[in-house]
Amino acid sequence: MVDYQYQPDMNDPVSKLRIAMDNMDVDALQSYVIPEEKADYTISVQSTSGTAMDTDINLDPELTGISVSRHQPESRTIPVMRSNLRLFPPPLFSRQTIPQGYNFRPNPASMVSTSVDNETGEEKKRYINRMRWKGYGPASIMFSDAIVPDKPPQVVEEGRNLIDKAILKKLEDLFVQRPVWTRMSLFNQLAPNETREILNSKALLPLVCYVFQDGPWRDTLVRFGFDPRQDRSARFFQRLYFRNANHPIARPSVITRRQDRSAANTQIRAMEEGTEKEADRRRSHIFDGQSITKETAAFQLCDITDPMLKEMIDDPDDLREECNERDGWYSSHGFERIKTVLRHKFFSLLEGHPASDEECRALLSNNDGFAKATIANRSYKLRAGKHNMAKGALRPEDAAAMRLRATLDRNAKTLQGLR
């Protein structure tokens, strides 16, 4: 692509950092700090008359075609402005074999921005990209935050005029009917084309709801102004999640992810054409204890219709006076019982047979003693941003046993295929 050599300034902090990395100089790496960004994008250097004025001093003089002699007559030096952007070229300039014909024009999305230094009063100009991406993420809070958001972030509010007003009104009506949703349960109330518009626009959901980063309502969509920690009836909107150890832990390849996206698009087109049962799709967020439509367990308590679980969820005797970060409005013992039964019923369905209520009662009677001991020794100090049991995770030893079992099953299937 290019036919020149570039000699970086070896006194530059980036050059020194690279040398320290090559030499494994731990002290230099630990002491490295990013230098303060200054607006000195051009600096004045001294140049002798009779040489090329536009020669970059970072280039090898032998490549410029200018003869360099040790015995040169004295000449007058004049100041020359050169670039000081410190843009180090990468080792591999481009994967393209043919250069792009940009005709030496600047980026059309760039514009000149003028700012004034408050200390010196100097006016400075720089180029900024006016088309840069503005994130439209929803407002999010921690369980420990005292105040819940009552309006969308300012950057989201500025994009209100660019979204579909009919879909926005439908979302607002759904959040009036029910203040807390999971994404799946909310999307199941909408038509496939509306779901696609919500996913593409990015700004529709942040205009009507906020999210919790942790706690019993983690990863749910909550209506602005509604605080589930202050309303005991919000216990029915708590979310339970169980990892499926049968899923491979390794990150899928790029090809696999592309195939998954193609399959998802095919599914959406099939739903639009009416070739898939609409009723089954709209009930994929509901757990009835007899059938499942997905391999991951992520349910709100209000979407569980299994009679045994429903009785345990509606029981008013196992409630707290104040909302807890781990178990929400339920007592630790009561919430553990709900998770135990739901986990057993869900994974039994994954194995191909529904679990009976008698099995679940026997399981509860065997686990009551261990569960009470575990709850008694539990530390309630949870760290923000870290994994916690509010998501319904298994105990470490149980999770390890399930991963081992899943690995053995996959290996057995592989051996059978080779035979």
Image: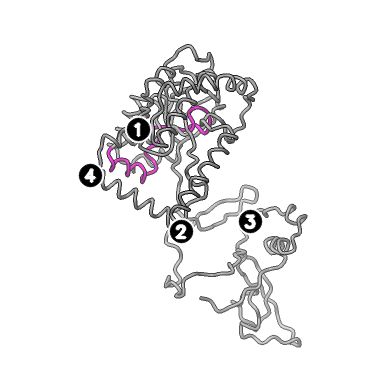
Are the residues tagged 2 and 1 within 8 Å (C-beta)? no
User: What is the quadrant of residue 14 in the picture?
Assistant: bottom right
Q: Disc 3 versus disc 1: distance between alpha carbons? A: 63 Å
Mark 3 closeness class: few <14, some 14–19, many ≥20 residues within 10 Å? few
Residue 275 badge: 4
Q: Which residues are magenta?
A: 191-218
Looking at the rendered image, the disc whose residue lies closer to the viewer, 3 or 1, is: 1
Q: Position of residue 295 (x, y in %)?
A: 41, 39
Rendered view: 178 above or below 157: above
**Amino acid type at mark 1:** Ser
**Amino acid type at mark 3:** Lys
Q: Is residue 350 left or right of residue 277?
A: right
User: What is the quadrant of residue 277 in the picture?
Assistant: top left
Q: Disc 3 versus disc 2: distance between alpha carbons? A: 20 Å
* Residue depicted at x 52% and y 50%: 250
Mark 1 closeness class: few <14, some 14–19, many ≥20 residues within 10 Å? some
**Amino acid type at mark 4:** Thr
Q: Disc 3 versus disc 4: distance between alpha carbons? A: 61 Å
Q: Disc 2 versus disc 1: distance between alpha carbons? A: 55 Å
Q: Earlier in the sequence, mark 4 or mark 2?
A: 2
Residue 110 badge: 2
Q: Is residue 366 left or right of residue 75?
A: left
Residue at which label 3 appears: 38
Q: Earlier in the sequence, mark 4 or mark 1?
A: 4
Q: Earlier in the sequence, mark 3 or mark 1?
A: 3
